Amino acid sequence: MTRSRLLAMAIICWIIAAMILIGTDAFGAGQTVEQWEAEMQAHPPRAQIESHYRSPGAWTDWNRFWFASAIGGQAADAATTIDGVNGHCHEVNPLFGEDPDEAVIVGAKVGLLLFGVWIAEHVYSGRRDQNMARNWVYGALAVTGVTAAAWNAGQDCE
């Protein structure tokens, strides 16, 4: 297995593990809904109380997770694409032409991430749904990057 395939697999495993850990922690693993509601009414968590006073633009843990996942997914896609082009695979992209060099691939990934940041941070700035927009934009970048990296890692062109 090449280095980029190992990197892509490690990033995919990290994202899956983080989703499982965050999901089980966020939804109170091992508790029924009634037990969770009773506990929340008796002892409201400090984070829940503080979230009422937090500004709408403040980053949440999910925003941070999806942003880190977007960077990791796009990095994995760039690494596997570069490995494929160097391994005699042919990248055919109407925007970049056939077999672009490494600088074009990395530049495209950085540009895509910056475009996502511009949408989530500038277009939705100050709106109540900014956190949801961050999750969707960065989540889409993460999923597309990881999916493309998995596809690239499965190609055997040598």
Image (cartoon, grey):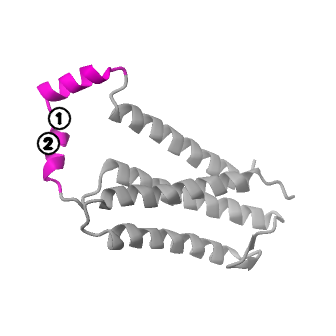
158 magenta-colored: no
**On screen, residue 30 above or below 127:** above
Place residue 131 in its image quadrant: bottom left
Crowd tier of the residue under label 2, counting other residues whose Cα lies within 10 Å: few below 14, some 14–19, many 20 or above: few
The amino acid type found where label 1 is placed reads: Pro
Q: Where is residue 134 in the image (x, y as percent from the top left)?
A: 38, 59
Q: How far apart are marks 1 and 2 (CA)?
A: 7 Å
- Say which residue label 2 marks: 49
Which residue is depicted at the point 37% across and 60% down? 133
**Any part of residue 33 in sight:** yes
The amino acid type found where label 2 is placed reads: Ile
**On screen, residue 93 above or below 152:** below
Q: Do the residues labelled 1 and 2 touch (CB within 8 Å)?
A: yes
52 magenta-colored: yes
Question: What secondary structure is found at the residue carrying circle 1?
Answer: loop
Asked whether 56 or 15 is in front, the reply is 56
Q: Is residue 157 left or right of residue 4?
A: right
Q: Which mark is residue 45?
A: 1
Magenta stretch secondary structure, dominant: helix
Crowd tier of the residue under label 1, counting other residues whose Cα lies within 10 Å: few below 14, some 14–19, many 20 or above: few
Q: Position of residue 4 (x, y in %)?
A: 68, 55
* Numbered range of the magenta stretch: 30-54
Q: Which mark is residue 33?
A: none
Place residue 116 in its image quadrant: bottom left
